[in-house]
Image (cartoon, grey):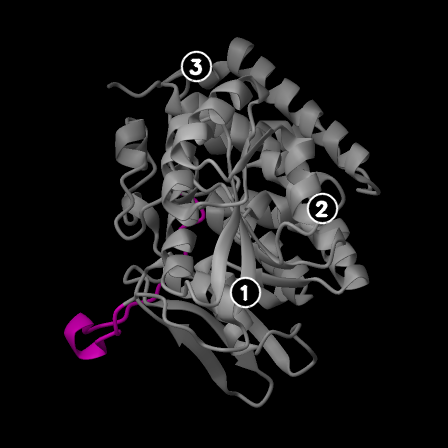
Amino acid sequence: MQRVAVLGATGSIGGSALDVIARHGGSMRASVLAAGGNVDALLVLCAHHRPDHAVIGDVAGLARLRDGLGEASPGTQAHAGPQALADLVSGDACDTVVAAIVGAAGLDSTLAAARAGKRLLLANKESLVLAGELLTGAAAAAGATIVPIDSEHNAIFQCLHGREAGADVRRITLTASGGPFRGRSRAELAAVTPAQAVAHPKWSMGPKISVDSATLMNKGLELIEAHHLFGLPGARLDVLVHPQSLVHSLVEFVDGSTLAQLGLPDMRTALAVGLGWPRRIDSGVGTLDLARHGRLEFEPPDLDTFPCLRLAREALDAGGTAPALLNAANEVAVSAFLQGRIGFLSIPALVDDTLAAIASWPATSLAVLGEADAAARRHAEQAIATGPFLMSRPHA
C-alpha cells in the first residue's frame, strides 16, 4: 500500500491528488493531509479520507483541529507547524509526498522529503526556484525520485522517460497558454482588476498562481525549474505560447526529432504519472479528441507586454540568489495587487526595481537564500509604501 502525504491538501492540486488517490484505494491511500490555516476544510477532507495524520500550518489552529478530529476522524492525529510537517514527511508516515504548498512556505517540508529519499511529486515551484541546486543535490544523495507535477515539466519528464536531458537533447520548449490577457497591449493592461487576472481561460488554480499566469511570471519560474530538473542551461530552454493548452511541452533531439506530450488541461494526468510511475494508472481524465479540438496554434511570447518572462530569464542567467530575489519580489507584488494596493503593470515594475537594487550573491545554503528572500521582501514592501507603485491601482 503506497502511503501518500498531500501537502496543500485544501488547494486545487491537493484536491486533484486526492481524487486520483481515491480511484486506487486498493493500492494507495492518503496517510498525511496538511493545510495552511483552513481548519474547517482540512476537517472535511479528514472525514472523507481518514488519514493517519493531519497537520495545520498555523499553530493557532491546533486546538480546533484536534477537537474537530475527535468527531470527524477519531483515528487521525493532529499536528501543527512546519517542524511537525517536516518530521512527518521525513519519517515512516508516508512513502510519497505531494508537495503542493504554495510559496516559500513549502520549502522546508519539500527538502525534508527529498533528504529522506521519498518519491516527491513536486508542485511547489518555489522549492526549485529558490533552492534548485540544494533540492536536486539532496534528492540525488538520498536516492529520492522527483516527479514534477507542473503540466509542462511533467510532459518533459514523460518525453525523457524520467531521466535528465543528456547530450542527445538539443532544446526543451515549454508551452504557455498566454493567460487571460493574451493579445492585449500594454496600455490595455493598465486597468486590469484582480478578478480579471485570476480568471484563467484553461486552468482552475489559486489566485497567486493565476496572477503569475496572467503576467507570464509562471513561465519564467518554470524556465528556472526546468534548468534544475533536467540539467539544461537557459540558452537551450524556450517558451512558446499555445492557447489551446493541449501540447504541454516539446523536447527536440539532435537527430531532428521532436517529442511532445499532449493531453487535456487537467492536473490529474500529471499526478497520476507521479503516483504510478513507471506504470500508467487511471487518472479520471477523458480522452483527447484532436479532431474535435481542431487547430493547434503556436506563437512567440510578447516580452514587451509581459516583461516578467524576460526578468526571470535574466535571473536564471545571473544565478546565485537572483532567482530567490525574483521570487520574493514577485510574491510581494502579487499579494499587493490582489489586495488592490498596486496596479497590474506594477508587478513587473516592482520585480525589476528589486532586482536592480539588490545584487545577487552565491546561494551556498538555505540561510543565505533566506537572507536574500527577506532582503527582497523588505525592499519591495518599502518600494510599495514610498515609490511610484501606488499609481494606477485597479478599480473594483
Query: Which comes sooner in the sequence, label 3 or label 2?
Result: 2
Left or right of 301, for residue 57: right
Q: How far from the left and from the top, in percent, is residue 377?
A: 62, 23
Verify whether residue 289 appears in magenta: yes
Outermost residue, left direction? 292
Q: Position of residue 178 (x, y in %)?
A: 34, 52
Q: Which mark is residue 1?
A: 1
Res. 345 in view: no
Disc on res. 145: none
**Figure quadrant of the N terminus:** bottom right
Which numbered disc covers residue 390?
3
User: How many numbered marks, from 0 up?
Assistant: 3
Which amino acid is tagged 1? Answer: Met
Local crowd size for mark 3, using a 10 Å CA cut-off: few (<14), some (14–19), many (≥20)? some
Q: Does residue 374 belong to the magenta stretch?
A: no
Q: CA distance from mark 1 to mark 3?
A: 53 Å
In the drawing, what numbered circle is on residue 112? 2
Q: Earlier in the sequence, mark 2 or mark 1?
A: 1
Q: Give the residue at x 55% y 70%.
A: 157
Element under label 3?
helix
Secondary-structure class at tag 1: loop
Q: Do we see residue 395 in this rendering?
A: yes
Choose the circle earlier in sequence order: 1 or 3: 1
Write the residue at 54% across / 9% down: 386
